[in-house]
Structure formats: structure tokens, C-alpha cells
Amino acid sequence: MVARVRPRQLALALPHAESLTRDNFLEGSANAQALALIDAWPDWPNRVMMLVGPEGSGKSHLASIWAAEAGARSVAAHTLTAANVPGELATGALVVDDLDPAAFDERALFHLLNLAREDEAYVLMTGRALPSVFAVELQDLRSRLRAVPVVVLTPPDDQLFRALIVKFCADRQMTVDEGLVSYLSSRIERSFAAARRTVELLDEEALRLRRPVTRALAAELLKDPAA
């Protein structure tokens, strides 16, 4: 678990841009099938596909890569309405991002899937849960969702996890050495979200204390008595 630090002095929070290009995507066994799907377009097994994986696993990054290639628009699933479906599908390709089982309009999604089939449009959905487990009231939508092919992104292996830590540090213009990367990779939860949040906290703490980002600072942040 990532320790929470109570700040004694606020550090200036600046935006940190994250590149979502193909060249900036970190490949590994956890996302190999999903990346293969994106690279295979338009030769997909179905015009409607879904990427499923935990927070921070790269679903939106992959969707952004595909959108640039396919000329697709992108819409947050919870904002989709029946009225805006035709406009969202205007380019013949659409990303429906972060499809939460408890936060979407069933009739809007049903209308979208129907219109996509009629127009032979491509739809790429992303979410954290398999569509087959959605508690959907509309029976026809339930069957449509269960028929959508899903590609699952799995937790990162050691190599990808270490690369993620380095990337998140680079995104925040933090200079780190191999010792710090090894220390973090062996002491925090093996997940994309934990890596991102730990790097964020480490950066914030370094700015607050006006100290370099080091293994010693990480040990203090994680409250590691063995360090």
C-alpha cells in the first residue's frame, strides 16, 4: 500500500502532460493482445470491440492511438445520450471511454450499437469490468454486450512495472536512478495505479521539502523502517 503523507507545506501543483502516442506506449505481456488488436485495425473480428483492464493499465492510451489512426471521435461513456449518438458516430469510428456498469444510459448505448451496425461503423469501448457481468435491464442490450469481443489487459510483469515507474518519473521530469526504481518496484503494490500515485507523491514530497528524489526520500514516504 502507498503511504499517505500529511503535507506541512503545500507544493505548487503543476500540470504534467502525458504523451498518448504509439511511440510512447510501453509494451509488455500485460498489454500485448490489446496492442495487437489496435495494430490489426481495420481487420478486427468484430466492428465493436472492448478493452478491459484495471485503472491505469493503458486502455485510454491504446484507445487514443486507435482514434488517431481511425479518425475516431471519443466520448466518455457516462455522457453518452441517445440524442448525441448520430453526431458521435459521424466519422464512422468512436471510442466510448470508461464504461462503468453503474454509470451509463442503457438506451443511449443500445442506440449506439444499433446505429453502428447499420452504418458499419467501428466502436472501441474501454472499461474496468467485463460487459458480460453488467446488470443491464434492457434484455436486447444485455445480449449485445455479451456478444462484444473483449481483450483483457492484465497486471504488469516486473519488467513492465519498472518501465512504468521510469516513464511516470520522466513524465514529471524527475531524474531517478536504477537503485530508486528497484526500491520502489519491490515495495509498492504491483499495479499501474499504485506506480502512478507513488511517483506523484514522491514528486510532491520532493518539491515540498526541496530535496532531490532519492531512495532515502522514498523510504521516508513509504515509512520503511528497514531503510
Image (spheres, grey):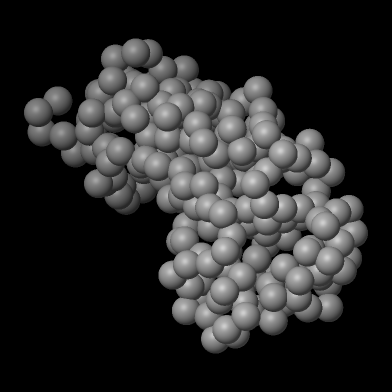
In the rendered structure, the answer to whether residue 215 lies left or right of residue 24 reads left
Q: How many marks?
A: 0
Outermost residue toward the left in this view: 226
* Residue located at (83% from left, 78% from top): 83
- Can you give x and y, in whole percent of width and height, for residue 176 in the image? 41, 17
* Residue located at (87% from left, 69% from top): 86
* Residue located at (51% from left, 76% from top): 102
Q: Is residue 140 placed above or below 122 in the rendered structure?
A: below
- Can you give x and y, in whole percent of width and height, for residue 208 in the image? 42, 37
Q: Is residue 38 placed above or below 131 in the rendered structure?
A: above
- Can you give x and y, in whole percent of width and height, for residue 178 in the image? 34, 13
Q: Is residue 15 visible?
A: no
In the rendered structure, the answer to whether residue 14 lies left or right of residue 110 reads left
Name the residue nearer the viewer: 131 or 158: 131
Q: Is residue 218 placed above or below 140 in the rendered structure?
A: above
Name the residue nearer the viewer: 209 or 212: 212
- Can you give x and y, in whole percent of width and height, for residue 146 in the image? 53, 67
Asked where in the image residue 75 lies, by quadrant, the reply is bottom right
* Residue located at (65% from left, 37% from top): 38
Q: Is residue 149 placed above or below 25 in the rendered structure?
A: below
Which quadrant, please, contains the C terminus?
top left
Outermost residue toward the top in this view: 178
